[in-house]
Amino acid sequence: MTAIHYQRQGEGRPLLLLHATLSSSRQLRSLASLLSRRFSVLSVDRRGSGQSAGEGPASPIDVATHVADLLALCEAERIGSLVAVGHSYGGCLALELAARQPHLVQAVFAYEPPYAPLAPAPARRHMEQVGRRTLEINASEGPAAAALAFMAGVSGPEAVAALSPGARERVGSAGQGAVADATLLGMDPDGLAAIACPTRIASGAASDPLYAQIAEALVGRISGATHVRLADVDHMAPILAPDIVASAVATFTAAIERA
């Protein structure tokens, strides 16, 4: 049995904060601190990542398992409704949670979710190839090598080559999470139509244009959803520019409260 690690800070409306692949709640501490000025923030290490990494072999995790974990967490914390904020894969999970548990999620803010089923065909094929390659490397060389293979597939081999020895070790330590997320197992694009809450998809103006393309495709699937582009930031904004992302979340939720 895997224990799901999370921390809660701040007062106000509950906000669930979900991290990206090759990451954990630790990388979102600054964002959590900023958001805790307005919300009661639950920062979660998703199953397979951070302090929620199990001791067994790494394997893909279906999004339904993550949703079940989050429901159990909300029950433990006696939370009946919340705002879901997610970065990258965490954004995909925030959307799936809202689609599958519409009674729980009051609003979604997803930053650059790599929702592969709605990506343009060439990008979708590449993302599927990265997922397969990650699993192959995990099977032959183990999770540390799989994490580096995932990073190479997403960011390019030059990004891996530029890592310092310490950074390379840190990426490798996230191998279980890379294997868990790489295939985006269980994503249900048709189910997105069930999302009934205000939804904002954000992308960075300095990011790969693919994220904006996916955002627009998501807006086309989710009634009332909007897409906003944040100036001067890229895919790492929730980690490296948390003030900009926190401000965007605050603007979004304030508009909901006024409506």
Image: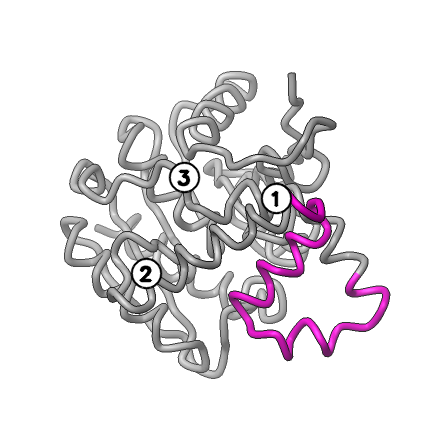
Does 6 sit above or below residue 157? above
Q: Residue furthest front?
A: 140
Task: Name the amino acid type tagged 1.
Answer: Gly
Q: Viewer-proximal residue, 41 or 216?
A: 216
Asked which secondary structure carries label 2, the reply is helix
Task: Name the amino acid type tagged 3.
Answer: Leu
Left or right, 2 with respect to 79, comes to right
Q: Residues within 10 Å of mark 3 (few under 14, many from 20)?
A: some
Asked which secondary structure carries label 1, the reply is helix
Task: Name the amino acid type tagged 2.
Answer: Arg
The residue depicted at 41 percent of the width and 75 percent of the height is 230
What range of the chain is rendered magenta? 139-168
Residue 61 appears at what percent x and percent y?
Answer: 50, 34
Q: From the image, tell me which residue sits under label 2.
A: 124
Label 3 or label 1, whichever comes before in sequence order: 1
Label 3 or label 2, whichever comes before in sequence order: 2
Does 126 sit above or below residue 256? below
